[in-house]
Amino acid sequence: MFRLRRMPRQQQPAVRPVRRRSYDQFCATARALDSVGDRWTLLIVRELLGGPRRYTDLHADLPGVSTDVLASRLKDMEQTGLALRRKLPPPSAASVYELTVRGRALRPVLAALAAWGAPVLAERRPTDAVRAHWFALPLLGALTGLTQGGVLEVRLDEGEFHLHVGRGAGTVLPGAEAYGPVYGYGPADRPDARIVLDAEVCLELARGGAGLAEAVKDGRVEVFGEGPLAAELRGA
């Protein structure tokens, strides 16, 4: 009678925790890049500077990113304290991602990168995707001299967005640890003023190639509204 030989049980490989890549340098810049240096991370921050967004909205406005990479980056951002995920109150059952205080503190970093990169946007390539709100940070930099605070609605051929400009915009809010809102998607509910221009003029303003007063005077920027912000934009 033959006996069945008992085969040795195959051992499972030990599961090791995934270690995030690091420069392993005792340097503030290197430590910062450990958190935001991966491809797509800063662009996700750019999207979330406009407010909480659903995963599907993020994927739609980040053309070229795969679903796996986007999910991985969002998870990394949660683990490093840059973003959090929360469920919207009923009747909505959707979950949204939003920046934490530390994540919102990246706003001046993104603004500086936008200012640095504006000169190389001289020509749009045929393969370039575009979204209207991608012009928000460059345009905000061109409007830092405004003294009247308010909500400015911006209309481009590519779509609409709105900016928080003037007093308090671009600075840390007094008595608070968080940065105030930068921009919002789509038209504003009750804008203090509205401007209509094209993307080329928007970029020219961001590059410093033209002043706002000059662009308004020669008709390349149309201003609508009756309040103090609209009056300042018209140069009144």
Image (cartoon, helix red, strand yellow):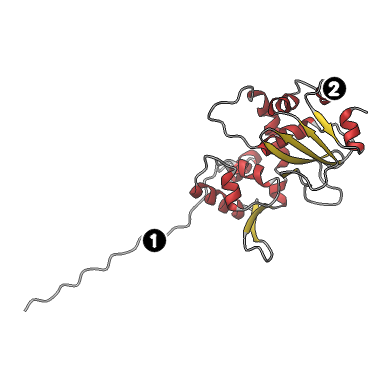
Res 47 seen here:
yes
Is 95 drawn above or below residue 110 in the view shown? below
Q: Residue at x 61, y 34 (%)?
A: 130
60 vs 116: above or below: below
Task: Give, as a three-letter code, the residue at label 2.
Answer: Lys
- Provide residue 186's location: percent of width, then percent of height: 71, 44
Quadrant of the rendered image containing residue 16: bottom left
Q: Is residue 150 left or right of residue 203?
A: right
Amino acid residing under circle 1: Ala
Q: How many neighbours does mark 2 have within 10 angstroms: few (below 14), some (14-19), or many (20 or more)?
A: few
Residue nearest the observer in this picture, 20 or 144: 144
Mark on residue 217? 2
Mark 1 or mark 2, which has the lower sequence index? 1
User: Is residue 26 visible to us here?
Assistant: no
Q: Which mark is residue 119?
A: none
Residue 106 rendering spot, x and y as whole percentages: 70, 43
User: Which residue is most to the left?
Assistant: 1
**What is the secondary structure assignment of the residue under circle 1?**
loop
Q: Position of residue 235 (x, y in %)?
A: 90, 27
Residue 9 higher or lower than 82, as above or below: below
Q: Which numbered mark, 1 or 2, is in the foreground of this view? A: 2
Mark 1 and mark 2: Cα distance apart in space:
70 Å
Q: Residues within 10 Å of mark 1 (few under 14, many from 20)?
A: few
State left or right for residue 62 relative to residue 187. left
Q: Residue at x 58, y 52 (%)?
A: 55
Residue 71 appears left or right of 115: left
Instruction: Look at the numbered discs 1 and 2 and tell me whether their residues touch, using CB distance below 8 Å.
Output: no
Residue at which label 1 appears? 14
Image spot of residue 104 (x, y percent): 71, 47
Using the rendered view, name the quadrant where residue 158 is placed.
top right
Q: As rendered, which of 186 and 144 lies closer to the eye?
A: 186
